[in-house]
Amino acid sequence: MFKSYRLFDIHGIPIKVHGSLPLFLILAGLLINLGGGVSGFLLTVLLWTLAFGCVLLHELGHALAARHYGIPVREITLYPIGGVAALAYMPKNWRREFVIAIAGPAVNFALAGLFALTYFLVPGALLGWLIAINLGLALFNLIPGFPMDGGRILRALLARRRSYFRATKIAVDVGRNVAIGMGALGFLSIFMPLASPMLLPISIFIYFAAKAELTRVALEERLGHADPLTSFFFPDAGSPSGRGTAYRESEAPRVFTWTFRNEVPTSTPRGDGRIIDL
Ligand code: ZN
């Protein structure tokens, strides 16, 4: 329904805004309206815009860390539920994944520290808001709900002493339990003031993204290739076999078919070598 719009580039990385974000800002301004009236509306929109500015800096942290390791960054997109830095792939080297994952929250911790320091010199409500937003962003993203930053950090640390697949399996299981807890909290928040009901859609996203990551890693393992898959799909998760498209940086997209059980491929995917027209 909504397209993403390119605003500007930072270090050659296109910065995009999803079309629903301005609508979300206007809605937030109307519903929250701090102080009331037109000035209250404008103040609320300004504060939320600043919050998304902090999300953008968080994503830039990931993006520039990835660039440092030579991983191409396609774009950064801001959505109402957060930002996405589209990396060409996540490195399998645990140290690199650890650094890229922690770079985002680290930016927010640094910003919170910087704003706190300024707050001591010139106290103000706006600085207080910026400190709270940055601490909130850093801590929320460190929750080990794969594929959030905390989940990636967990997998990286687990992969030090385990196979990449085992580490992913554990991180995904932890992430799913976190998602279930988060979903329950989000659901209850509709009826009582516990947390944000926004946790409900976020938890559903985490649950299914975790599942997709496990399948991707298992497929990669089966395909036995040094390069990571950049993306794949399987149209019917309920069927015992899947047809996937594997995209890699180093070669043209190929079609693979495989069978799987409990989301993990049980047969070696066979590529027919057909090149797909994109
Ligand atoms: Zn992040």
Image (spheres, rainbow, N blue to C red):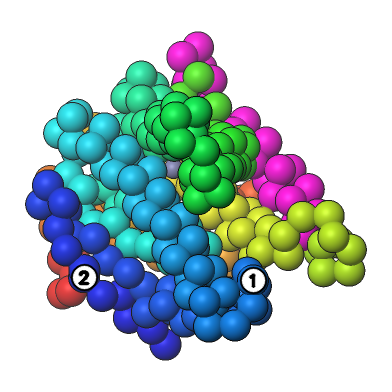
Q: Amino acid at mark 1?
A: Gly
Query: Height in image: 232 above or below 177?
Result: below
Instruction: Give the quarter of the figure containing the C terminus.
Output: bottom left
Q: Which residues are magenta?
A: 158-186
Q: Is any atom of residue 201 visible in this view? A: yes
- In the displayed orientation, state which residue is furthest to the top: 161
Horizontal side, residue 261 vs residue 88: left or right: right
Report the label total: 2
- Looking at the rendered structure, which numbered label has been put on residue 6? 2
Q: Is residue 218 left or right of residue 31?
A: left
Residue drawn at x 37%, y 55% as measured from the top left: 53
Residue wearing tag 1 = 35
Give SS at disc 1: loop
Q: Which of the four quarters of the rendered structure image does ligand 1 lie in? A: top left
On residue 173, the disc is: none
Which quarter of the image is occupied by the N terminus? bottom left
- Residue 240's quadrant in the figure? bottom right
Q: Image height check: is 218 above or below 84?
A: above
Under circle 2, the secondary element is strand
Tell me how far mark 2 sits from mark 1, CA to CA. Answer: 33 Å
At 73% across and 65% down in the image, what residue appears? 197
For image coordinates 53% across by 54% down, the residue present is: 209
Closer to us: mark 2 or mark 1? Answer: 1
Q: Based on the picture, tell me whether residue 173 belongs to the magenta stretch.
A: yes
Q: Nearer the viewer, residue 76 or 209?
A: 76
Q: For residue 2, which quarter of the picture?
A: bottom left
Sequence-first disc among 2 and 1: 2
